[in-house]
Image (cartoon, rainbow, N blue to C red):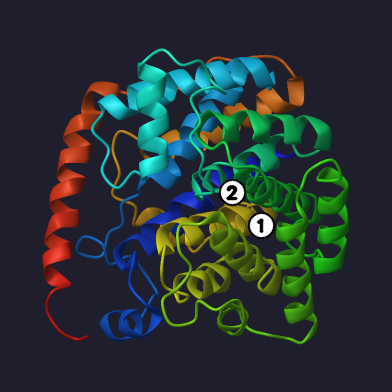
């Protein structure tokens, strides 16, 4: 996979995450009233910040660099990063990830630390795996499984995460000018999941292909799945189809794809992060609106840091050998997370006021 695809997946994730974060948990109707325009960031005075979606993507990328793409070593390294990530006092992390990380601290090895859950955490860190290692589909699948089984024991989580990784791989191969058809995507996904009990998920994918053939918008597809009023939840069987459909319907157009994903409501930051990562794997950084990237207010995980992680991961994937991770000033993370939490609490108070 080329360098721009990997960098695009990381920055697309960050841009979607930051754009969707202020609306997280809102039903579509109220979101449209409170945020009539989604042209730019609105988290903090016109700037955006990222949540655990981008943090996990970057931790996964760093573990991939250090492991050289070896699934067992990747799992060990990512589990170690998860443990230290928890000490940074992150806010907004899902209960599944928190419970699994607590089990890691208790001495459970990767794979035994997972809890029974089909949450969407594994899907948010899957596109970067597909963008970097998707040329080898079998290796990509093993890396996704290694990532999933650290936190989620329910096979559904693997099915959805693998679909998101495959989408990023196929988007990267197609580039900004070619489009991946839903049918071709589903056929390849079926081959990868041939030995899995994935009938329920593949039925969702079939409905997705049918909706695309009928020319449905992302919102119309969401209505068909039954979450038009509340928005997709944090279940991977809500999140993955929503993000995949937003990508399929807007290939080559990161802006439209992410905005349509956010407008679905519900778990907007994760859905938009996955959509942004997949779509930008096809366009590279050039396809992301510059103000979405320039408007990110992040430190120590700056945009320059994200680019360097993507560049080094692409080199590692191409060479097939382990590399050195990109340095991060970790002592700053608790302070950053405290500031982030204060902004989130202030925004929560604002939601108590109209418009409803």
Q: Is residue 104 above or below residue 11?
A: above
User: Mark number for residue 8?
Assistant: 2
Percent across and percent down for residue 302 are 36, 39
Q: Is residue 208 above or below residue 7?
A: below
Residue at figure coordinates x 52%, y 67% from the top left: 258
Residue at figure coordinates x 69%, y 45% from the top left: 162
Which quadrant does the N terminus fall into? Answer: top right
Residue at figure coordinates x 63%, y 41% from the top left: 6
Percent across and percent down for residue 339 are 15, 44
Which quadrant does the C terminus fall into? Answer: bottom left
Q: Is residue 327 visible?
A: no
Asked which secondary structure carries label 1, the reply is helix
User: Mark number for residue 106?
Assistant: none
Q: Nearer the viewer, residue 25 or 181?
A: 25
Percent across and percent down for residue 301 are 36, 36
User: Which of the two discs, 1 and 2, labels the residue nearer the N terminus?
Assistant: 2
Q: Nearer the viewer, residue 168 or 293?
A: 168
User: Mark number for residue 283?
Assistant: 1
Cα distance between the residues tagged 1 and 2:
7 Å
Question: Mark 1: few, some, or many residues within 10 Å (few <14, many ≥20)?
Answer: many
Q: Is residue 346 visible?
A: yes
Instruction: Report whether 339 appears left or right of 197.
Output: left
Is the residue under label 2 in contact with that under label 1 (CB below 8 Å)? Answer: yes
């Amino acid at each position: 996979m080329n360098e721009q695809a990997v960098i695009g997946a990381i920055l697309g994730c960050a841009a979607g995450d930051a754009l969707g974060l202020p609306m997280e948990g809102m039903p579509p109707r109220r979101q449209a009233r409170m945020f009539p325009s989604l042209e730019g960031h609105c988290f903090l005075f016109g700037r955006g910040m990222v949540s655990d979606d981008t943090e996990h993507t970057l931790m996964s990328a760093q573990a991939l660099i250090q492991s050289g793409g070896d699934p067992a070593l990747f799992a060990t390294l990512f589990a170690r990063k998860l443990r230290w990530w928890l000490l940074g006092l992150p806010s907004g992390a899902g209960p599944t990830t928190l419970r699994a990380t607590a089990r890691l601290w208790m001495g459970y090895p990767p794979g035994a630390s997972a809890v029974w859950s089909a949450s969407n955490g594994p899907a948010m860190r899957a596109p970067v795996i597909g963008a970097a290692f998707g040329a080898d589909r079998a290796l990509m699948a093993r890396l996704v499984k290694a990532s999933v089984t650290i936190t989620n024991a329910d096979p559904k989580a693997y099915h959805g995460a693998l679909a998101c990784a495959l989408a990023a791989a196929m988007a990267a191969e197609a580039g900004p000018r070619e489009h991946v058809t839903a049918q071709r995507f589903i056929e390849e996904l079926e081959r990868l999941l041939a030995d899995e009990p994935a009938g329920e998920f593949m039925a969702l994918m079939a409905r997705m292909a049918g909706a695309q053939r009928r020319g449905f918008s992302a919102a119309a597809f969401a209505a068909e799945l039954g979450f038009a009023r509340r928005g997709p939840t944090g279940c991977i069987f809500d999140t993955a189809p929503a993000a995949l459909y937003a990508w399929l319907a807007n290939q080559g157009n990161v802006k439209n794809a992410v905005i349509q994903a956010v407008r679905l409501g519900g778990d907007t930051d994760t859905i938009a992060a996955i959509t942004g990562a997949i779509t930008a794997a096809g366009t590279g950084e050039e396809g992301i609106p510059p103000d979405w990237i320039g408007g990110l207010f992040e430190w120590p995980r700056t945009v320059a840091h994200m680019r360097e992680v993507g560049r080094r991961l692409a080199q590692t994937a191409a060479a097939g050998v382990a590399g050195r991770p990109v340095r991060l000033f970790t002592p700053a993370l608790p302070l950053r997370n405290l500031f982030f939490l204060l902004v989130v609490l202030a925004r929560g108070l604002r939601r108590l006021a109209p418009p409803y």
